[in-house]
């Protein structure tokens, strides 16, 4: 079956990567979004995987509301993490039939499906900075966020503070779209970022 023009455009426009492996990201201006990975311990049975996935989601899920006060910007976070019904008949039945290898396959699929969640952060790069350099800048900026009293930069003061652990941030999934081939004018990336932040409203974006 022949793919549609829209399907072809999507496949040719977007790239996907892990935050820990961004060397193949093009060095050109563009739009990008960060997603929290849905990751759990797949070394045992299904119940162990679901429990650990639930725990990871609870500590890493985007904040439903957030406020900060004072010079140190101490944040108060509220989250509404989902809960799995581990006692359901379906889960109990699957728990007794899925092998460890099947659970690992399941975990890999769930990790990929992280892209179906809302992004926690949407950003952009302009003509003077490429996507790869910008993503590296984000990753480098969180190394000392606990000791940074100035909270310079939106990504460090919001995203890193919410995730708490820079190692967790490096496991995030990223989708990106280079825009240098678009003939939309000098401010096209800023306009695209504005539209995305105002419509999607990623939990850790307040600019727009």
Image (tube, rainbow, N blue to C red):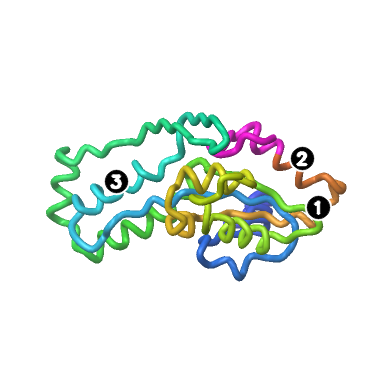
Residue at position x 39%, y 33% in the image: 79
Residue indicated by mark 3: 55
In percent of width and height, residue 112 lies at 44, 55
User: Could you tell me if residue 8 is visible in this image?
Assistant: no
Give the magenta range.
Answer: 194-208
Q: CA distance from mark 2 to mark 3?
A: 37 Å
Q: Would you say 88 lies left or right of 118 here?
A: left
Residue indicated by mark 1: 182
Q: Would you say 149 lies left or right of 51 here?
A: right
Q: Give 50 or 63, whichever is nearer the viewer.
A: 63
- How many numbered marks does the figure carry? 3
In this picture, is 154 found above or below 177? above
Q: Give 160 or 104, whichever is nearer the viewer.
A: 160
Secondary structure beneath disc 2? helix
Q: Earlier in the sequence, mark 2 or mark 1?
A: 1
Q: Earlier in the sequence, mark 2 or mark 3?
A: 3
Residues packed near mark 2 inside 10 Å, few (<14), some (14 to 19) or many (20 plus): some
């Amino acid at each position: 079956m022949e793919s549609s023009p829209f399907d072809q455009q999507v496949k040719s426009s977007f790239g996907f990567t892990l935050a820990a492996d961004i060397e193949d990201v093009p060095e050109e201006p563009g739009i990008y979004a960060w997603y929290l990975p849905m990751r759990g311990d797949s070394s045992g049975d299904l119940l162990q995987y679901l429990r650990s996935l639930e725990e990871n989601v609870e500590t890493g899920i985007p904040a439903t509301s957030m406020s900060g006060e004072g010079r140190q910007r101490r944040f108060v976070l509220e989250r509404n993490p989902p809960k799995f019904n581990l006692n359901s008949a379906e889960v109990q039945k699957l728990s007794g039939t899925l092998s460890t290898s099947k659970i690992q396959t399941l975990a890999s699929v769930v990790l990929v499906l992280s892209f179906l969640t809302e992004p926690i952060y949407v950003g952009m790069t302009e003509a003077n900075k490429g996507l790869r350099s910008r993503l590296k800048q984000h990753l480098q900026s969180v190394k000392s966020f606990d000791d940074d009293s100035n909270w310079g930069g939106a990504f460090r003061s919001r995203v890193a503070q919410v995730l708490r652990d820079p190692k967790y941030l490096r496991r995030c999934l990223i989708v990106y779209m280079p825009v240098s081939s678009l003939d939309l004018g000098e401010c096209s990336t800023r306009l695209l970022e504005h539209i995305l932040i105002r419509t999607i409203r990623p939990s850790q974006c307040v600019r727009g």
